[in-house]
Image (cartoon, rainbow, N blue to C red):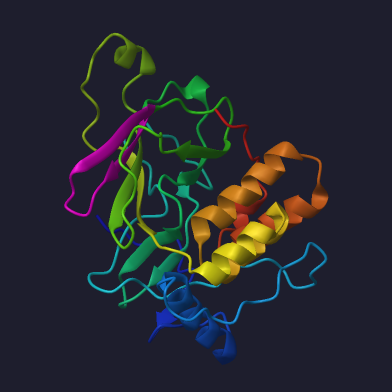
Amino acid sequence: MISPPMKLVLAVTLGCFSFLDIATCVVAQSSQQNVTKSSNSSSPKSKPLATSSRKQPLRLVLPPLPPGQPPGGRRYGGARRGQCPYANPGLTAIVPLTEQPISVMNVWGLTTVERPTFWFYTPYGNDSTYPANFVLLDENSNPLYQRDISLPSEPGVMSVSLPANIPSLIVGKNYRWFLNVYCDRPLAESLRGNNQKQQTPIYVEGVVQRVNLNQAIAQQIQQAQPRQQVAIYASYGIWHEALTTLAQLRQKNPQDTTLQQEWQDLLSSIGLDDISTKPLLPKN
């Protein structure tokens, strides 16, 4: 289901990006080609390693949409439903949002790993007793993974990682994910074995696609420090690893103000300024 978000964040026209200049737009397209190019082909010219002393704010270079039907999706949890209280910001998927074609909102990101981590802002803490679950579907809409989620102890940014016992994501395939929050049924009912959920939860939805890094980029990342890796991933449009690597650094170094600023810069680059200052919660 596709629902217009609270605001238009990014617009794509003919594969180029309105918030970048023409030169950067060309880089964004060529970067995506370089990322997915076979390692048997000639290596692209590598970009210089990013450093923590860079003067430009950390930002994602958004790759073009994958070919075929637009991914669609829903980045924001939407209006109040049932007993769900109003929250601003509300339930939010921390994923890039584009619009192409006109009026079709696409919530999607690239990953290079077999089982990526997904990030969300939830305005609900576990004292709300709202059941929640995460669902991952393959390209034929078959369930690949489903997990009940315990909401964190307080509102903030939480993560959901895919476990090692599910099939790895296949390169080039699109996988659709959902995070659902059911506000009309207490968690106690879930624990008593009542499987009836409200008909329409508050939810966010998007698509993840796994791509291969070519040899030159993979080697560049391997030789870099984690903070440098974040900038390299972002410069090639690899959203999930850019965000996850930076989040892990912040969780290990919660008082590091430079990491906090880079986190704000990265989220602001995809239009999530209102989420960028919210607490990053410890890993469950």
> Picture coordinates of residue 86 (x, y %)?
46, 40
* Residue 181 found in image quarter: top left
98 on left or right of 266: left
96 on left or right of 257: left
26 on left or right of 37: right
> Which residue extends farthest top?
192
* Residue 27 found in image quarter: bottom right
> Picture coordinates of residue 57 (x, y %)?
72, 68
The C terminus sits in image quarter? top right
195 on left or right of 159: left
For the residue pair 275 and 64, the one nearer the viewer reads as: 64
> Picture coordinates of residue 11 (x, y %)?
44, 77
Which residue range is magenta in the image? 132-148
Residue 143 in sight here = yes
> Which residue extends farthest front?
40
> Which residue extends farthest bottom?
22
**What secondary structure prevails in the magenta region?**
strand
* Residue 132 found in image quarter: top left
The answer to whether residue 189 is magenta is: no
